[in-house]
Amino acid sequence: MDVTRTCSVEECDRSHEARGFCPMHYKRFMAHGTPTLPKRVKPSCSVNGCELTVRARGWCSKHYKRWQYRGGDPAEHMHHRPLVERLTRRLAAGGKDGSCLEWTGARHWKGYGQIGTEDGSLAYVHRVAWELAHSQSVPDGMFVCHHCDNPPCCNPEHLFLGTAMDNTQDMVRKGRAPWQRTRGAA
């Protein structure tokens, strides 16, 4: 009758090798003096309320990347700042002598700046700039057009309200319509 001895560690059903342990637990015993290793407790992010595992500097990946990108306090989220402050932080220097104030943040594929609003949606920055400058919202059916034809520009002096027809007529008047472009021009 062959009775196979099993490892003496609880919840281990592997066969015995030496000193009452299976090969894995025996190697641990020889290396560390104990067959079982204490469970590693991974430290959590030092930002209040964040339970994610630490990546670097005591912060999780999210807060560490936020610190790398913006500096300052990684617990302070950009979207918790007022819209005006977020807008002004991302404007390139300029606009004093009538030049364009270019948006340096996220852009639509056509070049128009985009910013998150308080309700969580995205808005075009030039529309937000016009609304802030004129203390009213853009009426339904109206567009905020650029005198300067520079999509990332947010200078309120360069923006005007117009209909789709006004925008098209402005494009034709300036020679920017697709049929007005010369082929092969750089």
Image (spheres, grey):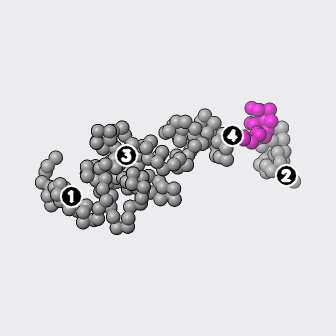
Q: Marks 3/2: CA distance?
A: 80 Å
Which numbered disc flags the more N-terminal residue, 4 or 2? 2
- Mark 3, Cα crowd under 10 Å, few <14 / some 14-19 / many 20+, is many
Q: Residue placed farthest to the right in the image?
A: 1
Q: Position of residue 155 (x, y in %)?
A: 34, 47
Q: Marks 4/1: CA distance?
A: 58 Å
Which numbered disc flags the more N-terminal residue, 3 or 2? 2
Q: Residue at x 31, y 48 (%)?
A: 157
Q: Which mark is residue 103?
A: 3
Amino acid at pointer 3: Trp
Residue 72, above or below 14? above
> Disc 2 designates what residue?
2
Which numbered disc flags the more N-terminal residue, 3 or 4? 4
Q: Position of residue 146 (x, y in %)?
A: 28, 53
- State which region is magenta: 27-45
Relative horizontal placement of residue 72, taking residue 130 as reference (left or right): right
Q: Which mark is residue 43?
A: 4
Q: Marks 1/2: CA distance?
A: 94 Å
Which numbered disc flags the more N-terminal residue, 1 or 2? 2
Q: Secondary structure at mark 4?
A: loop
